């Protein structure tokens, strides 16, 4: 049984990925400092899969702890590195917090992996590296644009670090560029746990639907899109999780064609904010209160993925549609509201 170390594994995307790894027959070990997640997620993973993953509460910025972890675990076959801070707005205000956490954790991980001869790593990148491309859909060779946030810089730098380290060492890496991950596991036992007022659209929509927020503000309706609102490529978190299993398989079966590879993870389909609102109302039967507000600084007008590379080389394709994204996000919000999740 191959053993995969999942950093940030109690977080939103990490926890869904641990479930899919266990379902696919992998042994998983989670490392997380719980800075943005909670311990009860481990019990939820056990409820879903019947397996409670081994857990280390460690900050990856503490190099000695990372060394101890790899020594204690022994034969790790691959690492999936989710651990990072991800709040774009906060990263503009506190850039060093992001450079320190996101870059130092990756440097520590790669150094220690090299030392102990663990040579496969999958990295969480983001479609934010593209900014607003001149041509859509964005392909993996669409050039990076100057990052508008420190968060975006850390993803660009992370990718560059991996490319160069993989060229110079035995490490093989795959960077996965996520478009807009939404939704929750169908059990509604795990999902996104936003802290405070959500910045992202989907948790804001579900929190407004449940009455936790008064109304949604749509950030601009004067864009050059069919209904004037921004276009994004929303992808179900379970589809995203399954792509990580494929990426691990590719590395472990020696199928990677380059020492560093990159894949877009999206559906390839663009959806406007208003389409999300309408679909939410249709799927949940709720009426969503919203108003049109000003554009949000830093937003791009339209971004969606070309997914052929992941389809052909990873053998992965997004299977779940907008209805499943919205209904699962809603089911999770309802459970959160009932207080069942933290019980
Ligand atoms: P999340 O915050 O739910 O999960 C990240 C986890 O990493 C958290 O559990 C947190 O406690 C942990 N962590 C952070 N810093 C750590 C450190 N120094 N040491 C140990 N643990 C640490 O976020 P997520 O939405 O699951 O995102 C996972 C990854 O995917 C991140 O790298 C994020 O940048 C990237 N990503 C997310 C999105 C998105 O919209 N959610 C989009 C593109 C890329
Ligand atoms: C989606 C759309 C908003 C909230 C961000 C990061 C990106 C990646 C994913 C990590 C936009 C609109 C939103 C609201 C709104 N994360 N919106 N009212 O900005 O595409 O991407 O998350 O890597 O790096 O930048 O996602 O969910 O914030 O916004 O109208 O209250 O919803 O303007 O058009 P975004 P989002």
Image (cartoon, rainbow, N blue to C red):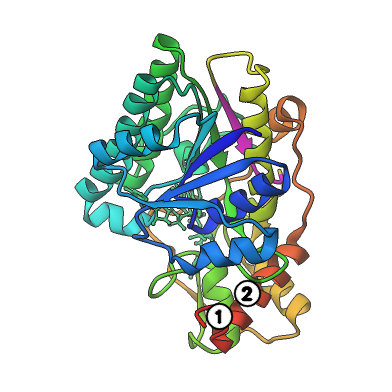
Q: Is residue 199 left or right of residue 304?
A: left
Does 242 sit above or below residue 144?
Answer: below
Vertically, is 24 above or below 225? above
Where residue 79 appears, as percent x and y from the top left, is 50, 34
Give the camera-side residue of 181 and 83. 83
Q: Is residue 45 left or right of residue 56?
A: right
Quarter-of-image position of residue 256 = top right
Q: Secondary structure at mark 1?
A: helix
Give the spatial CA distance, label 2 vs label 1. Answer: 6 Å
What is the span of residues highlighted in magenta in the rendered image?
261-267
Give how far across and how far down residue 196 sits, in percent.
38, 75
Question: Residue 299 has which mark?
Answer: none
Q: Which mark is residue 336?
A: 1
Residue 182 located within the stretch drawn in magenta: no
Q: Is mark 1 within 8 Å of ligand 1?
A: no
Q: Main secondary structure of the magenta part?
A: strand
Residue 138 visible within the image: no
Q: Looking at the picture, tell me which residue is in the foreground, 43 or 341.
A: 43
Is residue 291 placed above or below 127 in the rendered structure?
below
Mark 1, other Cα within 10 Å: few <14 / some 14–19 / many ≥20: many
Q: Nearer the viewer, residue 150 or 169?
A: 169
- Asked whether the viewer can see residue 64, the reply is yes
Looking at the image, which residue is at 49% across and 88% down? Answer: 214
Q: Where in the figure is residue 65, as x and y percent of width and height? A: 28, 41
* Residue at the outermost top position: 168
283, above or below 58, in the image: below
Whether the magenta-drawn stretch holds residue 263 is answered as yes
Whether tag 2 and tag 1 are in contact, CB under 8 A, the answer is yes
Secondary-structure class at tag 2: helix
Label placed on residue 332? 2
- Kindly identify the residue that appears in the image at 68 percent across and 57 percent down: 271
């Amino acid at each position: 049984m191959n053993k995969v170390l999942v950093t940030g594994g109690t977080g939103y995307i990490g926890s869904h990925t641990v479930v899919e790894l266990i379902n696919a027959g992998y042994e998983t070990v989670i490392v997380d400092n719980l800075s943005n997640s909670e311990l009860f997620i481990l019990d939820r993973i056990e409820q879903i899969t019947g397996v409670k993953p081994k857990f280390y509460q460690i900050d990856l910025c503490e190099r000695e702890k990372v060394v101890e972890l790899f020594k204690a675990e022994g034969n790790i076959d691959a690492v999936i590195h989710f651990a990072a801070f991800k709040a774009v707005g906060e990263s503009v205000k506190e850039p060093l917090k992001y450079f320190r956490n996101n870059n130092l954790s990756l440097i520590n991980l790669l150094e220690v992996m090299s030392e102990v001869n663990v040579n496969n790593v999958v990295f969480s990148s983001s479609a934010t590296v593209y900014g607003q491309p001149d041509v859509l859909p964005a392909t993996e060779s669409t050039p990076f644009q100057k990052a508008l946030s420190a968060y975006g810089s850390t993803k660009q730098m992370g990718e560059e670090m991996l490319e160069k380290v993989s060229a110079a060492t035995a490490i093989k890496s795959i960077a996965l560029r996520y478009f807009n991950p939404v939704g929750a596991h169908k059990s509604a036992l795990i999902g996104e746990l936003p802290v405070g007022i959500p910045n992202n659209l989907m948790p804001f929509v579900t929190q407004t639907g449940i009455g936790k927020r008064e109304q949604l503000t749509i950030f601009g309706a004067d864009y050059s899109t069919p209904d004037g609102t921004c276009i994004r490529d929303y992808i179900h978190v379970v589809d995203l999780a399954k792509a990580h299993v494929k990426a691990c398989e590719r590395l472990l079966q020696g199928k990677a064609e380059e020492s560093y590879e990159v894949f877009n993870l999206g559906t390839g389909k663009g959806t406007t904010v208003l389409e999300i609102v309408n679909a939410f109302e249709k799927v949940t039967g709720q009426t969503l209160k919203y108003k049109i507000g000003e554009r949000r600084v830093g937003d791009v007008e339209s971004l969606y993925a070309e997914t052929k590379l992941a389809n052909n080389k990873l053998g992965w394709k997004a299977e779940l549609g907008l209805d499943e994204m919205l209904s699962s996000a809603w089911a999770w919000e309802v459970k959160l509201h009932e207080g069942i999740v933290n019980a």
